[in-house]
Structure formats: structure tokens, C-alpha cells
Image (cartoon, rainbow, N blue to C red):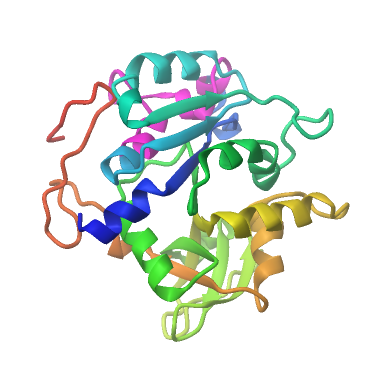
Amino acid sequence: MNERSNHLTQRTYAIVLAGGRGSRLRQLTDRRAKPAVPFAGKLKIIDFALSNCVNSDIRHIGVLTQYKAQSLIRHIERGWGFLSATLGEYVDVVPAQQQHGERWYTGTANAVWQNAELLHQAQPDHVLVLAGDHVYKMDYAVMLAEHVARGAEMSVACIEVPLEDAHEFGVMAIDADSRIVGFEEKPARPRPIPGRSTHALASMGIYVFNARFLVDELARDATNGSSSHDFGKDIIPSLIGRQRLFAHRFENSCVNMVGERPTGATWARSTPTGRPTST
């Protein structure tokens, strides 16, 4: 990682949204949140997002919990305690506290808004918003560097998906410079990629924001009585045409199964015990 990328990641705060039930998993989430579902033995689904952060040198992390969070809290406290507090590194587990009003989280944007004090305390330049229930390997530093180079206010990680599956995602349209010019959340009739009629460009639910911009937009959204306070349904559509939104291609920052970045540099992965792994 070069000096510029290192500076960007050290000035980034990651928010991991880990409060969802994951009802499609049925019995697996009867007693735990989806991010706490076991994966490959002692690991949990949330370890993918956390490992991606740590291996991208993003080590200021807040995990927002809500639904049946005890096993998730225990796993993070026992498995991710290896970060160096003396260097200011941490994974904070943040329970829902009804910071604004008496309601629990009403959407993904509302969850971040209710915890805006975390950003005030951390004073980051950028905020990385992630889901805690996705399985993938990614170098977030690549996305951050691209975000800054483009002068973006918000960047959305995206991936091409078959058109028949696209109704399950937020589908975006981009121009020749990868600027987002259209966005629909779970459309009944997804728009295909120009020149590739069998696929659509889908959001991965991975966002990079300029920190001040994010807080201002969340504050604006919080006063909108007709909003569902969700990034995909409300925040992104409201920004198109008035702010600099760009799509980041996952293929440019994905980490392959042998542990290399797209550039070929060695990728020393950390497990929740803090030890490198070759799996």
C-alpha cells in the first residue's frame, strides 16, 4: 500500500450495519442476527466485512447491532480484540440506543444517522458503509483512492448480475465516466447494461462518502417525513443529478482466492485471531 492510500485508510471510519435478522435464512436466524451465523467452523459471516477492513488498513470500525445481537457481540469481543488500542485501532460494538426519538432503526440511513456522534468523535475524512452479512473479499483502499481521484461525494461499489436476478438489487445506470445517472431499488423490470442485454449493473451495498457530506445528507433525510430513510430507496436517488456520485467496479478491487490484490501485491489476510491464513 502506498503512502497516499495509507493516509486515506487511516482517515476513514467504517460503519458495519449488522442489525438485520435475515429472515430468508429461517431457523438459522431465529436466535441470532444474520451476521452472527456460523461460516466455515468458528468464523461468522461478519468476519468477511471485518477482515476486509483490517486488511485494507481501515482500523476504526463501528458495528451497529439491533436484532438478537448477544452472540454477535460475544464473537466480536472475543475474536477481534487483537487490534492495538495504543495505536488507536478498535472495533466498537454499538447497540441501538434510540439516539433520535423513541423508535428503533427504520432504515439503513437512519441507523447511521442515529449514530452520527460516532463520526463526530472519530473526525474522519471519509466514511465507509458496509453490510455485515455479505460474503466477499475486497480491498477497500482501491475504492477509496478511486473515490478521491474522481472528486466524488459518494461512491457505490457495483457488480454485473444476470438480468433475471437484478430485481433483488439496486440497479444503476452510469455514463461513460462511471458517474451514476440513474438508480432504482429492486425494480420489477431492471434496466440492462447498454450493449449487454443479459446483465444489469447492481449495487453491492458498499458505499464511500465524504464524511461532512454524509452527515449533511443524513440530517436532510431525517427531516423528510415521506422518506423510508434507506440508502438505496431514498439517499442515492435524491442525490442523482445534483451531487457527484460514481460507480466503483468490484472487479477492480476484489481479492482473489489465492490472496492477491488486483495489482498482484501480497495480500496478508487476517482471521479473527489476527493470524494470517492461506484459505
The one of 250 and 90 positioned closer to us in this rendering: 90
The one of 164 and 123 positioned closer to us in this rendering: 123
Please provide percent x and percent y for residue 48: 35, 37
From the viewer's perspective, tell me whether residue 196 is left or right of residue 213: left
Please provide percent x and percent y for residue 120: 60, 41
Whether residue 274 is visible to the viewer of this picture, yes or no, is yes
| Quadrant of image for the C terminus | top left
From the viewer's perspective, tell me whether residue 29 is left or right of residue 145: right
- State the residue at coordinates (74%, 39%): 106
Q: Quadrant of residue 77?
A: top left
Please provide percent x and percent y for residue 223: 84, 52
The verdict on residue 277 being magenta is no
Total of numbered circles in the picture? 0
Please provide percent x and percent y for residue 57: 29, 44
Q: Quadrant of residue 198?
A: bottom left
The one of 87 and 72 positioned closer to us in this rendering: 87
- State the residue at coordinates (80%, 54%): 227
The verdict on residue 35 being magenta is yes
Q: Is residue 236 above or below residue 115?
A: below
Whether residue 206 is visible to the viewer of this picture, yes or no, is no
The residues colored magenta run: 28-51
Q: Is residue 266 above or below residue 278?
A: below
Q: Is residue 226 above or below residue 137?
A: below
- State the residue at coordinates (57%, 32%): 22
| Quadrant of image for the N terminus | bottom left
